[in-house]
Image: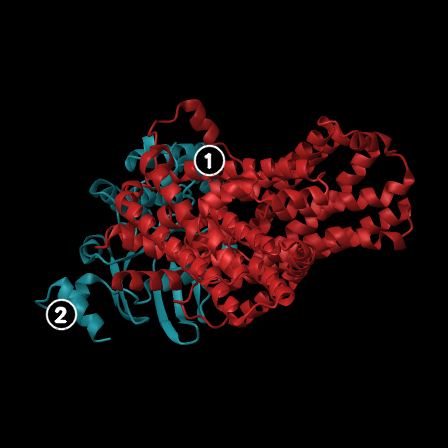
Chain colours: A red, B cyan
């Protein structure tokens, strides 16, 4: 127990950077935290309102517990889904794995420390989702004081069972399927599985979107539908947790605690047997050691010029690092595919209204000018912000950023090459979306051209803005590549303006004259803004990189 | 030629990593930069290469100031950092070609040099593999090759022999000797006193950010008769 405690504390401090004791950035971080809280407020508020309305609707039929059921099922499912990515990263592929293996530690001590660390990771999502719903519940239901005690304990323990189940599945895979011992292969496989899952969910959601509210309510209240049954089987402690909160039953609460403890016990017992089988040799990489033939050698050693070579280096590293491929590149395909699948499947499943509507659009109608222009701008903004390439361009360098400082290539040129990689992927996403739109929506060539021109403005804006954000606050200290992209707040700082700028023009549309003059004026204004952004990026490339010390 | 004039560097306004350090390395010299862990060796090398900015003082590489003319100065040297874990997902050959492009090496020259150094370091069959699959020593070799490919007049190397097998270490030491024989400069940090003894024309001993000795090893031995090199090193650094 003493070893577990020491290990867990070190892991916790290391993960949350508490060891370096830096105080200089704490003010900035506080500001960032506040900014994010404010930015997420509308989402949290909508969640609160949704829960409140749901409760008012369910109260007359005495089904108010359904809100809590849905909340905890959502929490557990999200945690379980995230564990597919979290467990391999934390348990197997983190940099400390080999160091820990050499220490006189038992498998269950390492696993328990890592398990507790993953539970802490999950608290952010858990509390973000739970607090608005619980506030609504407390307001409407006015429960007794024991409710608060129980709900806090249940929330703190809620990630345990889904994480344990996720970890058991991953541990079995790692121990008995040697294919997945290769980190890159594992990340590719799990990542693409998740993408397929996201597209699948979208198709299912598309299918249920047409259900009437009454039918949906009936489906949920029946309580015996297969989806809920699966969740009940997967998370056996949940029904007791919910029951203890709804009717105040202490027996249910104790049963919840007992089942949770039992799951931890089983999980630790399994980890004792199979964790070491899976982790040994996990970071080994295969190599061919085959000599290049003359043709390949000459191709590989051809002159490309410094800028092109730097750009290619960026692209290669992104494509060959699974986490970057999935987060930075795959998104360029994902949105258009979801778009194609949703609309395509709706048309294919005989929704005549939609295809009649599409066929009835007169693309030459001048009333569509502003809508099309703003849609183009939004497309450019969204395609560029989703790939997160420029907001993480420096962060992805991590501790190797010093390389940028000693080579004889100007900072401006290096930053431009990084931005070029962002622009290339964004442009690819835009073109891919446009092709999807051309196929489905049968757009007029002028409309296509207008969308393309406006989306390029959005693309330039977002990529340069992303680069500026990363120049201001690059995240260079990280243990795994995933942290540079997924646990990097820079993403949020560019996504929020991108969303705002995508929707704002539509809100202002009714105040603007719908003609070519407005479109051209907007185009000129955007060009001016982009020109200023490019200038600012150039200046900041020099000052920020010169001042950066690693 | 390297001229370091009164450079100082303080971290977080408190820890003085390098304090008023000055030394001049003439062309044709191999300098061993020696000191205990945390003495300020890497900080000095980082300032010489433009990775860190000195708080005061200036550094000239072949007469070019690294602070005022950074790009021109960076063309003068090749740098091997202490950790060779860079661009792990590039293939060895891609990394070398990338370096050749950055330093503007023409196609024929780069091909000739890649072949030559790959043979010298026994890396020919590994060039088509990703650096991720390399051992520590092989990563060190590919980074050294990345420097040699553009044939800079000044070599700045941070612990270049760490992790190299005896054959490659021998090859690199030979290359250092050949390089200075052409009237060029090598400046490298090391912990291995025997390497410094056999290879260097002069040594610079640093501790707690201050230069304690700069001169030939012969002179140092004359100053401390009947003492082994290890004893001399311990004595010099302990008295700092």
Residue bearing mark 2:
B224
Point out the frontmost of discs 1 and 2. 1
Left-right relation of A213 to B188? right
- Which of A544/A488 is in front? A488
State whether residue A520 is above or below residue A123: above
On the question of residue A290 being in view, the answer is yes
Q: Mark 2: few, some, or many residues within 10 Å (few <14, many ≥20)?
A: some
Q: What residue is disc 1 on? A: A189
Q: Which type of secondary structure does the marked residue at label 1 adopt?
A: helix
- Foreground residue among A504 and A252: A252
The residue at 43%/28% (across/down) is A297
Question: Left or right of B123: which side holds A457?
Answer: right
| A519 or A266, nearer to the observer | A266
Q: Quadrant for the C terminus of chain B, please.
A: bottom left
Comparing A94 with A54, the one in front is: A54
Which of the chains bears the disc numbered 1? A
Q: Let me know if residue A475 appears in the view.
A: no
Residue for point 72% across, 31% down: A346
**Do discs 1 and 2 share a chain?**
no
Q: Position of residue A246 (x, y in %)?
A: 55, 59
| Callout 2 secondary element | loop
Q: Is residue A351 left or right of residue A79?
A: right
Residue B177 x, y percent position in the rendering:
27, 47
Q: Quadrant of residue A305?
A: top right
Q: Quadrant of residue A38?
A: bottom right
Q: Residue furthest left?
A: B226
Name the residue located 34 percent from the left edge and 59 percent from the top edge. Answer: B26
Vertical arrangement, residue A112 with respect to residue B225, above or below: above
- Label 1 vs label 2: CA separation? 65 Å
x and y percentages locating residue B168 in the rendered image: 25, 41
Rendering coords of residue A512 (x, y %) = 89, 53
Report the chain holding disc 2: B
């Amino acid at each position: 127990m003493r070893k577990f405690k020491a290990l867990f504390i070190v892991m916790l401090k290391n993960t949350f950077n508490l060891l370096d004791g830096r105080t200089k950035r704490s003010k900035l971080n506080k500001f960032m935290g506040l900014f994010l809280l404010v930015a997420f407020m509308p989402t949290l508020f909508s969640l609160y309102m949704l829960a409140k309305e749901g409760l008012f609707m369910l109260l007359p039929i005495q089904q108010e517990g359904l809100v809590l059921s849905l909340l905890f099922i959502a929490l557990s499912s999200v945690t379980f889904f995230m564990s597919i990515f979290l467990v391999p990263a934390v348990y197997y592929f983190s940099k400390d794995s080999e160091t820990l293996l050499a220490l006189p530690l038992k498998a269950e001590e390492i696993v328990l420390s890592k398990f507790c660390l993953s539970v802490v990771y999950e608290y952010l999502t858990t509390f973000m989702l739970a607090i608005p719903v619980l506030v609504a519940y407390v307001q409407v239901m006015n429960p007794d004081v024991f409710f608060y005690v129980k709900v806090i304990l249940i929330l703190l323990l809620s990630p345990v069972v889904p994480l344990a189940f996720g970890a058991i599945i991953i541990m079995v895979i790692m121990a008995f399927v040697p294919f997945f011992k290769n980190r890159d292969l594992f990340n590719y496989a799990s990542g693409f599985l998740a993408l397929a899952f996201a597209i699948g969910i979208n198709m299912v959601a598309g299918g249920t979107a047409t259900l009437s509210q009454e039918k949906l309510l009936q489906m949920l209240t029946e309580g015996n539908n297969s989806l809920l049954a699966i969740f009940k089987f997967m998370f056996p402690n949940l029904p007791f947790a919910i029951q203890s909160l709804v009717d105040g039953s202490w027996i249910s609460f104790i049963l919840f605690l007992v089942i949770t403890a039992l799951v931890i016990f089983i999980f630790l017992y399994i980890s004792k047997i199979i964790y070491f089988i899976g982790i040994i040799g996990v970071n080994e990489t295969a190599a061919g050691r085959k000599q290049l033939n003359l043709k390949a050698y000459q191709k590989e050693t051809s002159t490309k010029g410094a800028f092109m070579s730097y750009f290619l280096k960026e692209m290669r590293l992104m494509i060959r690092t699974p986490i970057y491929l999935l987060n930075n590149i795959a998104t360029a395909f994902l949105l258009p595919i979801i778009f194609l699948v949703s609309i395509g499947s709706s048309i294919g499943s005989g929704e005549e209204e939609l295809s009649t509507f599409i066929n009835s659009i007169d693309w030459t109608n001048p009333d569509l000018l502003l809508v099309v222009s703003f849609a183009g701008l939004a497309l450019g903004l969204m395609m560029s912000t989703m790939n997160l390439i420029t907001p993480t361009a420096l962060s992805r360098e991590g501790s190797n950023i010093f390389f940028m400082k000693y080579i004889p290539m100007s900072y401006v040129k290096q930053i431009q090459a990084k931005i070029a990689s962002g622009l290339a992927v964004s442009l690819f996403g835009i073109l891919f979306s446009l092709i999807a739109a051309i196929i489905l929506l049968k757009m007029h060539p002028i409309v296509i051209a207008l969308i393309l021109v406006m989306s390029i403005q959005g693309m330039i804006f977002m990529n340069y803005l992303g680069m500026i954000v990363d120049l201001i606050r690059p995240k260079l200290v990280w243990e795994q590549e995933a942290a540079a992209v997924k646990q990097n707040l820079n993403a949020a700082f560019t996504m929020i303006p991108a969303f705002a700028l995508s929707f704002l023009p539509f809100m202002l549309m009714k105040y603007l004259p719908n003609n070519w003059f407005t479109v051209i004026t907007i185009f000129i204004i955007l060009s001016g803004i982009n020109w200023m952004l490019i200038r600012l990026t150039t200046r900041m490339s020099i000052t920020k990189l010169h001042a950066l010390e690693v | 030629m390297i001229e370091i004039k009164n450079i100082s560097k303080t971290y977080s306004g408190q820890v003085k990593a390098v304090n008023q350090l000055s030394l001049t390395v003439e062309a044709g010299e191999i300098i061993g930069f020696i000191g205990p862990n945390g003495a300020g060796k890497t900080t000095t090398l980082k300032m010489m290469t433009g990775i860190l900015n000195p708080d005061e003082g200036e550094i000239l590489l072949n007469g070019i100031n690294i602070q005022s003319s950074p790009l021109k100065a960076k063309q003068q040297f090749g740098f091997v950092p202490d950790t060779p874990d860079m661009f792990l997902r590039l293939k060895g050959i891609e990394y070398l070609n990338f370096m050749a492009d950055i330093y503007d090496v023409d196609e024929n020259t780069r091909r000739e040099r890649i072949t030559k150094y790959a043979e010298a370091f026994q890396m020919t069959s590994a060039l088509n593999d990703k650096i991720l699959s390399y051992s520590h020593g092989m990563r060190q070799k590919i980074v050294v090759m990345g420097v040699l490919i553009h044939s800079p007049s000044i070599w700045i190397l941070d612990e270049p022999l760490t992790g190299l097998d005896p054959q490659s270490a021998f090859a690199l030491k030979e290359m250092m000797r050949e390089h200075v024989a052409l009237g060029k400069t090598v400046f490298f940090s090391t912990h291995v006193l025997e390497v410094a003894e056999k290879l260097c024309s002069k040594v610079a001993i640093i501790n707690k950010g201050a230069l304690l000795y700069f001169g030939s090893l012969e002179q140092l031995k004359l100053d401390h008769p009947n003492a082994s090199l290890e004893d001399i090193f311990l004595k010099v650094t302990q008295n700092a």
